[in-house]
Image: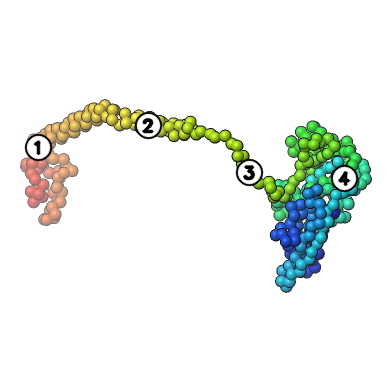
């Protein structure tokens, strides 16, 4: 079958959204995807079925008009059958950085891309095997800049082997250049540029003829587990004793805490005597200093009480508050006013 099936194209002046699901099921088959950029754009159903999906599948599509709230339902029957020529043995997957998934799904865009591959593969009869958005492979959503695309993976298959132009892109020299974030060097003409900007560092070449029966082709699914693929734990697991694990996780912290407690108890209890003696020595020094200051103060007071010298001029009264009389401090007193109380001297 074709890799894409356009859903009913909505009129340009009405926003219409679609919902597609497998008949009598809530979601689409695991191999089929639906994409619509905005309600004003065309919606696409695309995908590549595998041999497990051979048969008839009925897809139910419901269109919803976001202005008039009208709904229309349509049924689509997809017949999947094996190709009479079998699977193509040589497959090359390209990453086109300047295209989005909805731009590559139309048939005319795929034909233009096949023409570009044909000039490098040098053979006709190429087949589009799969088309996948770069976001489905783990790519990042681009910044909202103009002409900034998400990227799309497109896989092309052929019966003829790869040419030197394709194989030299995967040479060790070019692989080393890709690690240095440099573009590979190719001797042939790049027929993709400038319409298709191919990331040659992400080129994947698959040769099914060289694979053994035990090898599997890398297939990127949609992340949904297949039926019967749930994890079942083994029943014959041997018993395990956790005694030594218990000793390691419990006794080791306990012994470490006990050791720290003993060290703290020794510091708090056994070392207090030396600290007490040191405190006593400090107290004695402070008491001696205090008594020395007190004795010196008493001695100075005794000396001041018995002195016979005149009082300093700064201490003599110059103005009587009660009488208003002014006294010349330079007059010689008949007596030593230093021996007279201050109140009597002012009278």
Q: Residue at x 18, y 30 (%)?
A: 288
Q: CA distance from mark 2 to mark 4?
A: 76 Å
Q: Which of labels 2 and 3 is toward the front? A: 3
Q: CA distance from mark 3 to mark 4?
A: 35 Å
Q: Which of labels 2 and 4 is toward the front? A: 4
Q: Earlier in the sequence, mark 2 or mark 3?
A: 3
**For the residue carrying disc 4, how many other residues have a C-alpha within 10 Å: few (<14), some (14-19), or many (20+)?**
few
SS category of the residue bearing label 3: loop
Q: Is residue 269 left or right of residue 175?
A: left
Q: Residue at x 79, y 32 (%)?
A: 172
Would you name the residue on which mark 1 appears?
305
Q: Which of labels 3 and 4 is toward the front? A: 3
Q: Earlier in the sequence, mark 4 or mark 1?
A: 4
Would you name the residue on which mark 4 appears?
86
The mark total stands at 4
Residue 131: assigned label: none
Would you name the residue on which mark 2 appears?
258
């Amino acid at each position: 079958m074709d890799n894409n099936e356009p859903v009913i194209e909505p009129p340009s002046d009405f926003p219409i959204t679609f919902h597609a699901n497998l008949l009598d099921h809530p979601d689409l088959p695991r191999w089929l995807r639906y994409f619509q950029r905005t309600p004003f754009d065309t919606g696409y159903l695309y995908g590549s079925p595998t041999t497990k999906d051979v048969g008839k599948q009925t897809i139910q599509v419901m269109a919803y008009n976001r202005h008039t709230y009208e709904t229309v339902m349509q049924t689509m029957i997809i017949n999947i059958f094996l190709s009479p020529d079998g699977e193509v043995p040589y497959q090359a997957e390209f990453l086109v950085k300047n295209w989005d998934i909805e731009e590559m799904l139309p048939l005319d865009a795929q034909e233009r891309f096949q023409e570009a591959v044909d000039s490098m593969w040098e053979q006709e009869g190429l087949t589009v095997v799969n088309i996948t958005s770069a976001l489905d492979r783990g790519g990042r959503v681009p910044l909202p800049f103009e002409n900034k695309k998400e990227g799309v993976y497109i896989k092309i298959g052929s019966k003829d082997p790869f040419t030197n132009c394709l194989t030299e892109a995967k040479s060790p020299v070019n692989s080393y250049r890709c690690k240095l974030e440099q573009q590979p060097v190719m001797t042939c003409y790049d027929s993709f540029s400038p319409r298709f900007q191919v990331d040659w560092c992400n080129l994947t070449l698959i040769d099914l003829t060289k694979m053994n029966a035990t090898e599997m082709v890398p297939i990127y699914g949609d992340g949904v587990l297949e039926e019967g693929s749930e994890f079942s734990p083994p029943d014959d697991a041997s018993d395990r004793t956790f005694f030594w694990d218990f000793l390691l996780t419990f006794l080791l912290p306990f012994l470490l805490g006990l050791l720290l407690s003993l060290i703290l108890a020794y510091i708090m209890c056994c070392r207090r005597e030396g600290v007490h003696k040191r405190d006593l020595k400090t107290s004695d020094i402070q008491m001696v200093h205090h008594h020395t200051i007190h004795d010196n103060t008493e001695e100075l007071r005794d000396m001041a009480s018995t002195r016979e010298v005149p009082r300093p001029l700064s201490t003599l009264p110059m103005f009587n508050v009660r009488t208003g009389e002014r006294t010349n401090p330079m007059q010689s007193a008949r007596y030593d006013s230093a021996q007279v109380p201050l109140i009597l001297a002012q009278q």
